Amino acid sequence: MNTSADLDFATTGFVHEKVDPKMDLFEEIRRLKVKKNAVILAHFYQDSDIQDVADYIGDSLGLAQQAEKTKADLIVFAGVHFMAETARLLNPNKKVVMPDFRAGCSLADSCPPADFKRFKEAHPNHLVISYINCQAAIKALSDIICTSSNAVQIVNSIPKETPIIFAPDKNLGAYVAKKTGRDLVLWNGSCMVHEIFSQQKIAQLKIRNPDAVIIAHPECEEAVLKMAEFIGSTTALLKFTKENKAHAFIVATESGILHQMQKDSPNKTFIPAPPDNNCACNDCPHMKLNTLEKLYLCMKHEKPEVLIQDDIREDALRPLKRMLEISKQLGL
Ligand code: 13P
Ligand code: SF4
């Protein structure tokens, strides 16, 4: 059960303590890592400073796989709540902390457990495949979890005659349905960052940069995906930009990934796909709640801690384990 202190962190977010502005945070974080036998797992959408101090940076599947095999005593999760929750599900006896407890996810929020339970009941005999971007309570109502890097393979692993509910991302669901030729029952959820890209502005950008290759995350809407030469998870997008011969890329996903793309390919140009408003950024406001300072404070105080409700732990872990097993069998 969540303690009252953790419920409080849902409002306050992190330990509020003045940090000496002269402190070398990178050095302090490294010192705490050794002292506490901690591992820092960070998603590609984190600030570049956090990516640079992390032990592992990856997509949701990679992060879950790292969480599953870590020998560290303390898991410091620089990402959003459902990711840290996943790490905790896989490590019931370890402490999992995150820099800012308020770092949620619009996609996970678009699928409230009570509503989803009713949706599931309205579709009896359906197998439930849920995207990892959901609350533990949704995982507990699911048969298998998937991520953007294995969703197609996971759906393909299910016999053709089995009807499937795919939740919560309707865009990823539609993409998977198209790739697999399956008729999936979709939950109507979406990501606020990936839904905001403007098809028109991307087209204009392509006219001005004809040699640039458009790449996109499958959480984007179909109209944007149709323009993309390559579609994949953050890890797949990064790999593609490294291996592809093109010198410029228009990137339709959260802007944090550009840091690793630029690091891996310093001589290539990465252009963030423009959103459908006047904001020049594609930042996920949840991911960007985490800062280096908050990362330091959460390691120092080992708070806020991510906890799972006792009554859903086992049911939420089962479909997650199933995904990790299938991924292993498929060499993903
Ligand atoms: P991946 O890193 O798994 O591609 O997911 C992107 C995302 O939106 C994470 O919140
Ligand atoms: Fe959620 Fe979208 Fe942010 Fe990913 S980018 S954490 S899916 S809101």
Image: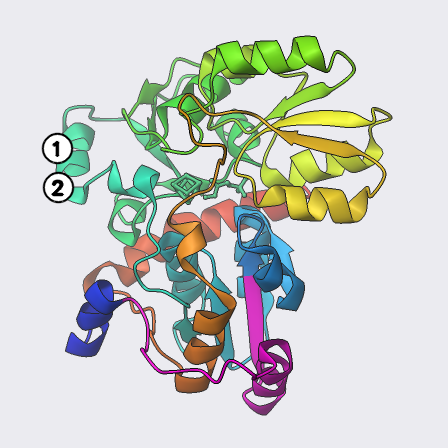
Q: CA distance from mark 2 to mark 1?
A: 7 Å
How many marks are shown on the rendered structure?
A: 2
Residue hosting label 1: 118
User: Residue 312 falls in which quadrant of the image?
Assistant: bottom left
Report the front residue among 72 and 17: 17
User: Which image quadrant shows ligand 2?
Assistant: top left
Q: Is residue 71 above or below residue 154?
A: below
Residue hosting label 2: 114
Q: Judge the density around disc 2: few (<14), some (14-19), many (≥20) Cα neighbours within 10 Å.
A: few
Report the front residue among 19 and 91: 19
**Which percent across, then down, holds residue 279?**
43, 31
Q: Which residues are magenta?
A: 13-41
Q: Judge the density around disc 1: few (<14), some (14-19), many (≥20) Cα neighbours within 10 Å.
A: few
Report the front residue among 43 and 263: 263
Q: Amino acid at mark 2?
A: Ala
- Image quarter (top left, top right, bottom left or bottom right) of the N terminus: bottom left
Q: Is residue 61 left or right of residue 126?
A: right
> Is ligand 2 less than 8 Å from the beta carbon at label 1?
no
Name the mark on residue 29: none
Q: Is residue 251 left or right of residue 171?
A: right
Residue at left 14%, top 24%?
122
User: Residue 249 falls in which quadrant of the image?
Assistant: top right
Q: Is residue 142 visible?
A: no
Q: Is residue 34 visible?
A: yes
Residue at left 23%, top 72%?
6
**Which percent across, then down, holds residue 177?**
46, 16
Q: Is residue 329 above or below residue 100?
A: above
Q: Is residue 175 left or right of residue 263?
A: left
**Which percent across, then down, holds residue 125?**
25, 26
Q: Is residue 37 magenta?
A: yes
SS label for mark 1: helix
Badge 2 vs badge 1, beta-carbon distance below 8 Å? yes
